[in-house]
Image (tube, helix red, strand yellow):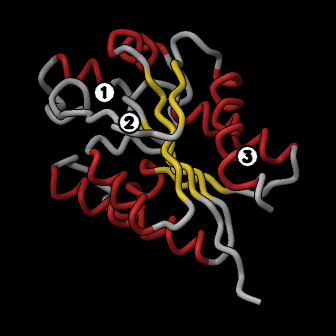
Amino acid sequence: MAQKSGWCVWVTGLPGSGKSVVAEALLEKLKAKGIQARIVSSDMLRKVVTPQPTYSQDERDMVYNALVLVARLITLKGFNVIIDATGNLRRYRDQARKLIPRFIEAYIRCPLEICIQRETKRGKTFMAPKQIYKKALEGKAPTVPGIGAPYEEPKHPEVIVDSDKLSPNECAQKILEAIQKRFLSKT
């Protein structure tokens, strides 16, 4: 009997939208249900692939191509993956959708002003660079998504959560429900 591939959910949104906190809450909810999954973050991968990041377009292309490849390989081995990554261009997420058979996109929607406030105040960065919006607004980081680089909102995500209105736990619950509806109700 052929091994069933794992599924992948890409948690996307602006920096400071709450992606990492929501991904961690989702992981805990999955564990509580006895469902194994792993978080693969672009910031974690970037530390290995580009230890002195420039955040250029070529570098982003390389990091996101590697991220999608890693997630694809993990899911093909039957494991579940939560991608925690801005993926500022729609084509990155579209590539994952094309290459990962069991895929959904979860959009953590949050107004830029709130993302800036959160990012400025947060203590735990989940390996993300610190004070990116401050640096962007001072002209020291010209490629921050939402300021100097575009963030292309998903056109047809399977789930949208408004992290300025819902707690991370509530956001994670909505994503879990989408995962259950799409992947777990058929098992």
User: Who comes first in sequence, dot 3 or dot 1?
Assistant: 1
What is the quadrant of residue 170 in the picture? Answer: top right
Q: Is residue 92 visible?
A: yes
Q: Residues within 10 Å of mark 3 (few under 14, many from 20)?
A: few
Q: CA distance from mark 3 to mark 1?
A: 35 Å
Reading the image, the residue beneath label 2 is 129
Disc number for residue 132: 1
Disc number for residue 180: 3
Residue 76, compared with residue 185, is above or below; it is below
Residue 68 located left or right of residue 33: left
Q: CA distance from mark 1 to mark 2?
A: 6 Å
Q: Residues within 10 Å of mark 2 (few under 14, many from 20)?
A: few
Residue in the foreground of this view, choosing between 63 and 178 = 178
Q: Residues within 10 Å of mark 1 (few under 14, many from 20)?
A: many
Disc number for residue 100: none
Amino acid type for the residue under numbered disc 2: Pro
Residue in the foreground of this view, choosing between 73 and 40 = 73
User: Which quarter of the rendered picture does the C terminus lie within?
Assistant: bottom right
Amino acid type for the residue under numbered disc 1: Ile
Residue 2 located left or right of residue 86: right
- Residue located at (32% from left, 64% from top): 65
Image marks 3 and 1: residues in contact by CB distance under 8 Å: no
Image marks 1 and 2: residues in contact by CB distance under 8 Å: yes
- Residue located at (38% from left, 36% from top): 129
What is the tally of numbered marks visible in this picture?
3
Q: Nearer the viewer, mark 3 or mark 1?
A: 3
What is the quadrant of residue 23 in the picture? Answer: top right
